[in-house]
Image (cartoon, rainbow, N blue to C red):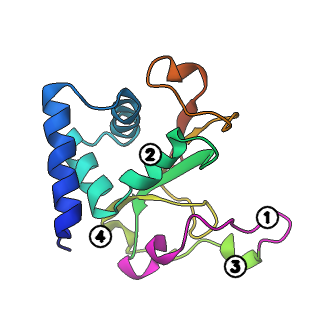
Amino acid sequence: MTESPDSQRRREECERKARRGEMDPRLEFTFQLLMDATGLPRHQIMDHIFEGNMLDEINQLFLPNMRNKLMWFYQEVDEVDMPAERDLNKPGPSRAGASSSSKTPQGASGGAHNRPHKLFITDGWSCAFTGICIYMFRINIQKQLPEEGFHKDLYCGYIDANR
């Protein structure tokens, strides 16, 4: 998959800022959380971020009255099962209204170890959780998450399904 010219430009700009130490500390924190949880080096995290065009979604977590949570899965995937087509800005099903098919494991075959790993943003309902789940959320979305002291308003962590 090749990057669009706009995506390539944004990636290069982000990498330049990171090298000069000018990157938004909230983004830097997010990248570090993803590196710690997945064990991937920075350049591979950046590849996933820009391949999936996740930067705008990550930035929405920091803005007032936008997203209050982000959740990534890093796991083996079948390319046809990727939830990339789903509009994550639309509200997902409630727990009570979720269909049983959204909770059933997909692709539970014996030859699953040859599938590639993918880091992607999910709502948690569109595919089964089989790898690592990284989450970030904030309680108060009424004001922008500040660049300094944002740790006080941001809750994050990860869960490994294999442990």
Choose top left, top right, bottom left or bottom right for residue 95: bottom right
Spatial separation of the CA atoms under disc 1 and disc 4: 33 Å
Q: N-terminal of the two: label 2 or label 1? A: 2
Disc nearest the viewer among 4 and 3: 3
From the top left corner, tell me how far across and down residue 128 is, in percent: 57, 66
Disc nearest the viewer among 4 and 2: 2
**Would you name the residue on which mark 4 appears?**
114
From the top left corner, tell me how far across and down residue 113 is, in percent: 34, 66
From the top left corner, tell me how far across and down residue 130 is, in percent: 52, 59
| Residue projecting furthest to the right | 96
Q: N-terminal of the two: label 4 or label 2? A: 2
Q: N-terminal of the two: label 4 or label 3? A: 3
Residue 139 drawn above or below residue 113? above
Q: Amino acid at mark 2?
A: Asn
**Would you name the residue on which mark 1 appears?**
94
Q: Residue at x 27, y 63 (%)?
A: 51
Spatial separation of the CA atoms under disc 3 and disc 2: 31 Å
